[in-house]
Amino acid sequence: MNTKAFCAALLATTLLTGAASAAESQSTAHPALWPAAKSQGLVDPQTEAFVDSVLAKLTLEEKIGQMIQADIASIKPEDLKTYPLGSILAGGSSPPLGAPDRSPIGPWVKSVEAFRDAAAQRQGGTQVPLMFGIDSVHGHGNAVGATLFPHNSALGATRDPELIRKIGAATAQETAASGFDWAFGPTLTVPRDDRWGRAYEGYSEDPQIVRGYAGQMILGLQGAVSQGGVIQQGHVAASAKHFLGDGGTHLGKDQGDTQVSEAELIRLHVQGYVPAINAGTMTIMASFNSWNGEKMHGNKSLLTDVLKGRMGFDGFVVGDWNGHGQVAGCTPKNCPQAANAGLDMYMAPDSWKDLYANTLAQAKSGEIPMARIDDAVRRILRVKAKLGLFQQARPLEGKEAVMASAEHRAIARQAVRESLVLLKNNGVLPVKASANILVAGSGADDIGQQAGGWTLSWQGTGNTKADFPNAQSIYSGLKETVEAAGGSATLSVDGSFEKKPDVAIVVFGETPYAEGVGDIKTLEYQPGNKTDLALLKKLKAAGVPVVGVFLSGRPLWVNPEINASDAFVAAWLPGSEGGGIADVLIGDKAGKPRTDFHGKLSFSWPKTAGQFTLNRGDKNYDPQFAYGYGLTYAAKVRVGTLSEKPGFTIATDNVSNYFVGGKTPAPFEFRLTPTTGVQIRPVDAGNVQEAGRQLTFSGDTAATAALAADKAFDLSFQANADIDLLIDYRVDAKPTGPVALSIGAGKLDVTPVLEASPVGEWKSLKVSLKCFQAAGTDVTKVTAPFELSTAGKLVVSLQGVKLTTDPAGAVCPAKAQ
């Protein structure tokens, strides 16, 4: 990109907004201050004439239907014979119809076809094609067998806009092959606080990189949008997100409040949307966050006056997952405020039916003006026309050969190579290809860990190696490379060995997470439980040279781990092509580099664990490794011993782990009421001595065994996010009476579950928090997240009780009587 041109534009924007007063830190924008843009190619006479003809035929019911999107897990194809909805999405953990939650493209295509066929059977009215959307945020991550590209925080380190366009094009082809025509990306956030669990969805802390990438990713996904043309030939609609300020929330809290002036909102957070609109992005997604107290889904001054007015956006604005329900005075089932603010399509995954009825009534009463409805539907029809949905051709749909093609995997591997950032190299790298290498660490042979969140499930958890048939782990890539040159690579996750290796490559880091769950309160890596540091030190003490390969979605304070390594590489979340690591770390037989390091930090690396908002240009900017830092083999720079004082400690709040590994993490403890009716004792579990607890209910009186805390905590986010309570249990003596599983007032009957469980066999039970909520639990005030009660006899052992983000196998028992 042209850096001088960008700086000039940025300076102009800053001067333009400099006159804004202190009073501007309200949620009402001043459109004249905002940069102008224009949706290229979306509006043309031919398309508008066609849209006019369709719009004129639609009934009010059909118009409202176009404005509502339902999730595939909460709607059946036959529903479309009655409800003329405009769109279906597949959420991060929503499976295809009648298929496992981890499926290749076949079941996805069949699901899309089933909804299309059912919609075509609706009697009377006008047929408008459905739009199918999915979160293809680092490749088509919902489909087994897809190419998974590095997450955006890694791509920012490449400084390669052309590569971004290639990634967009490959992602579009694999998304289209599974039947979807709409990708919910790119994310154009500018993360300013690295505690935020979505930081890895941002390319950089600096808007310059985001601005340089935005248009290229749109062009890759959509192709060039031209006057009179359509883009269905292997392309999909893009959705620039999340408008606006999602990366600037106070304290890095997901869905929180971005408390900045209008000038700062423009300078930092809108810059990527200008090139995105100029490139013709068909949709823009409204953000969950607020701006100075007002939720974006209800902010008319930004959605309508700025985005559609000043910035000239001609596509449509889609909501985020029930985001409209967070607007003041709204619920997920009822929110005319969002439509009146400028939201064109509600994302109403599980609230769609009631929302449809309420929105229709509000349209009939005039609460939502007809002009606003017609504008929203016109925008949706315009996009569907430009996307080619009114035409029958789907050239890539069902083409399995498109998935993880050699070309796509080569692009992904290039992205891995270019994104690696060398933080330290005290003479160990590159490793001779002829060496005897020990490959250790939890991430060495775990493709799920190297891929991160938004991978086959929302949080990216619960994945196994079998879920990635076309991928390569980091260990496999290292082994393949060195064995081809006569060397050897041995996998030993715990770092044990019989013959001393020439070098150890230790792969470790963050385990998968996504929004909310990934929010943290300190940047210290593994605070209080530094198992990976212990592994590094163990190998160093054995006299083995150590290369640390750190997997993370964001910079974290890892000074002790860097000190314990002779070389240290920030590998981010590289995705499916682990072989890209070997391309750079492994040299030739003589130890000369085959590929040099290319990556430069697009996020500043912290010197202390408390540098949450460490961004280039900040006052008193003092990073450990500055924005733009990244060593090469040519630069012979040695990194000395770094300070191991974190500079910040915090007692992290535990609201998700109640009984793990034989322990009850604070603030939870077992509480038995009355002790004459139920007793507890340690038992062995999972081949670990006394890792379980056995509960014996005498049957003499009604009794309860609970895991409880002294202070109430809020699980409303977890309930809204479809998180489950996971109980690993063993029935040792069948119940003789009804058994209730409770959280507060919400009581569920688990008697059938326990009666069906074989005596003496460990089993797992997952129950959605929403089930307890529906039964009466106040999820905002939870003190005991697990209560088991019965008046009968029962002996049951527990191995673990915690919350899980993996929905596979979750059940919803009936409400206890």
Image: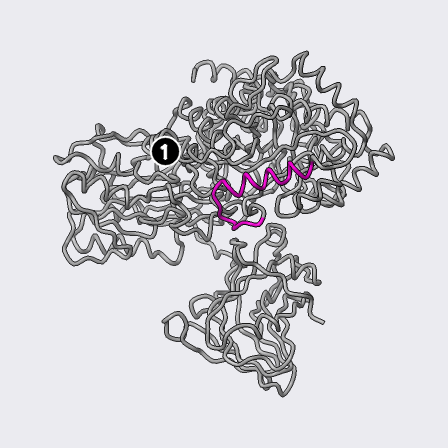
Label 1 secondary element: helix
**Residue at the image position 37 percent from the left and 44 percent from the top:** 551
Quarter of the image for residue 342 reads top right
- Membership of 414 in magenta stretch: no
Q: In the shown orientation, is residue 4 left or right of residue 126?
A: left
Question: In the rendering, at what x and y percent does residue 656 appear?
Answer: 53, 59
**Residue at the image position 70 percent from the left and 17 percent from the top:** 50
Name the image quarter holding the C terminus.
Answer: bottom right
Q: Which residues are magenta?
A: 98-119
Q: Nearer the viewer, residue 816 or 664?
A: 816
Residue 756 visible? The answer is: yes
**Residue at the image position 50 percent from the left and 79 percent from the top:** 732
Question: In the rendering, at what x and y percent does residue 237 appear?
Answer: 57, 27
Q: Classify 10 Å Cα crowding around label 1: few (below 14), some (14-19), many (20 and above).
A: many
Residue 629 visible? The answer is: no
Q: Is residue 442 above or below residue 174?
A: below
**Residue at the image position 24 percent from the left and 44 percent from the top:** 547
**Disc 1 marks which residue?**
409
Q: In the shown orientation, is residue 732 left or right of residue 156?
A: right
Q: Nearer the viewer, residue 759 or 648?
A: 759
